[in-house]
Amino acid sequence: MIVAKRKPFAEIKAMLKGYKKVLNVGCGTCVSVCLAGGEREVAILNTEIEMTRKLDDEPIEIQAHTIERQCDREYLAELDALIEEGKFDALMSMACGVGIQFLAERYPLIPTFPAVDTTGLAVNQAVGWYEERCRSCSQCVLGMTGGICPVTMCAKGLYNGPCGGTNKGSCEISSEQPCAWFKIYERLKGQNRLDSIRKINSVRGWDDQTPRNLVQPGYKKPENMAR
Amino acid sequence: MSTEKISRSGSNLEKILKSGQFAFTGELGPPRGSDVDEVREKAKFLKGNVDSVNITDNQTAMVRMSSWAASIIAIQEGLEPNYQMVCRDRNRLAMQADILGASALGIRNMLCLSGDHQKFGDHPDAKGVFDIDSIQLISMVKQMRDESKFLSGGDLHGAPKMFIGAASNPFADPFEWRVHRLAKKIEAGADFIQTQCIYNMEKFREFIRLANEEGLTEKVYILAGVTPMKSVGMAKYMKNKVPGMDVPDDIIKRLQGVEKNQVAQEGINIACEQIEEFKALKGVHGVHLMAIEWEHKVPEIAAQAKVLPRPKPE
């Protein structure tokens, strides 16, 4: 899932400076599961903002609303009436970067601010602990690397590792960081597939250097689509 | 290693290795500033004592004078540079441009490296490029040199003349992988290899034995990496803090066993004993001496290691 963490409070406070009526929109999917931007986190942040603004003698009216998914028009639409009537002078989003942008795009006349930093595509290792596993590079090499991603987990994103910095199974950057290629080596050895990485992996093209658009086979972009 | 005896790059180091002589290379770290004299001062100690000098490229991810610029100064001082290039700081466009420029200015050796992670250096928040990795860099230089083609496949006019080097760390784990990685670098096009600093001789002998067994030492020239210990503190630091470094306790004990003012000399003694063994070790074709910030000791070490005078190929 997509994981995110709340921005430092001072940064959030600075963004909202001068705005008196704000709607904070949570997202009920990924960021809710990773405890960053669901209903509960929206409520906590709003309370903190209200309190600090009160103490500063600059009161703010901040409302909360969490929708199922901010990356989906169908769910965003349920905000239309609320935002129309609310006359908010700013919106805040606790969704991932995708959701924040879709919200901002839907209400282009209202300033929209992010309350979280999106940190990646991660697995849930334990409650509250998320480990990045995919950089969505568009060219998956997991078949060759025994199901361990070197693009994400190797600090140098190497394609022909492990490099000379492998340190007792850890990456040279930290003993806390496992060496991706060491793990790849061990996994492939266990599968008797080391040949897979003894071949030279030639230079790859980076397909993620321009914004990517995906239209699945059998589908097409609708004509006259509002953007 | 191609069996041909002629030099394709015009490199002095290549000629020496191809003539079957034991090579001896040194290292020079460019300054953290634009002071040419700093390079010249270090160069003075290396001239005539080594066949080629590695000019490091933002080593340990600290910003320094660019390696190609320092390489040119080295040439002016009568040294043959071994121009180091890391994958951390440049994308494929910048790398190819610098390779062409280096060749145009008379640089004839290149060492292709991944590079220490930027986290170690003085700009830990920098974006690491790693557009291509060290093995891909080796094959890119080879393609430019031998096929006159850019990485893209497009034609280039005036192939860069380079004797292509790569690094090998026999001590990083998994140990069995190290020979495979060496094989990959040879397949990619490495002409010569310089190893990580060797302290664990037993492990290194085993590495070379495996490389001999795989026939790899017939295909590439291997220069064994030697760094004399300056102090007990340095030995402990290398053992505990430098990733991929293997310093056996015996080395530390030996340094601790001499009078304090004799530790540096003992470090040099150890290095020279290693060099003596490398001269006779099948599969080793030379030594790469990394006297880190100790360039002024190189004449003394070279003399004690009995590698002087250096050959002067035609």
Image (tube, coloured by chain):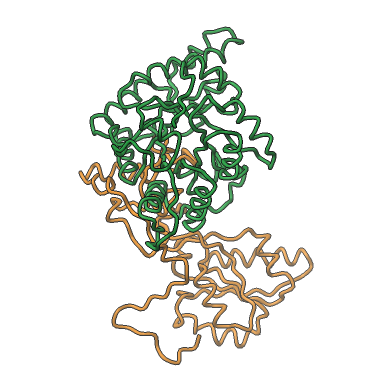
The answer to which quarter of the image holds residue B114 is top left
The answer to which quarter of the image holds residue B224 is top left
The residue lying at 40 percent from left, 62 percent from top is: B155
User: Up-down: is A143 above or below B63?
Assistant: below
Residue B117 visible to the viewer: yes
User: Up-down: is A63 above or below B84?
Assistant: below
Residue A126 visible to the viewer: no
Q: Residue furthest front?
A: B314
Chain appearing in orange on the rendered image: A
Chain appearing in green on the rendered image: B
Asked if residue A114 lies left or right of residue B85, the reply is right
User: Up-down: is B276 above or below B240?
Assistant: above
The residue lying at 42 percent from left, 18 percent from top is: B274
Asked if residue A110 lies left or right of residue A163, the reply is right
Q: Residue furthest bottom?
A: A224
Q: Position of residue B261 (x, y in %)?
A: 61, 10
Q: Nearer the viewer, residue A115 or B277?
A: B277
Q: Nearer the viewer, residue B7 or B286?
A: B7
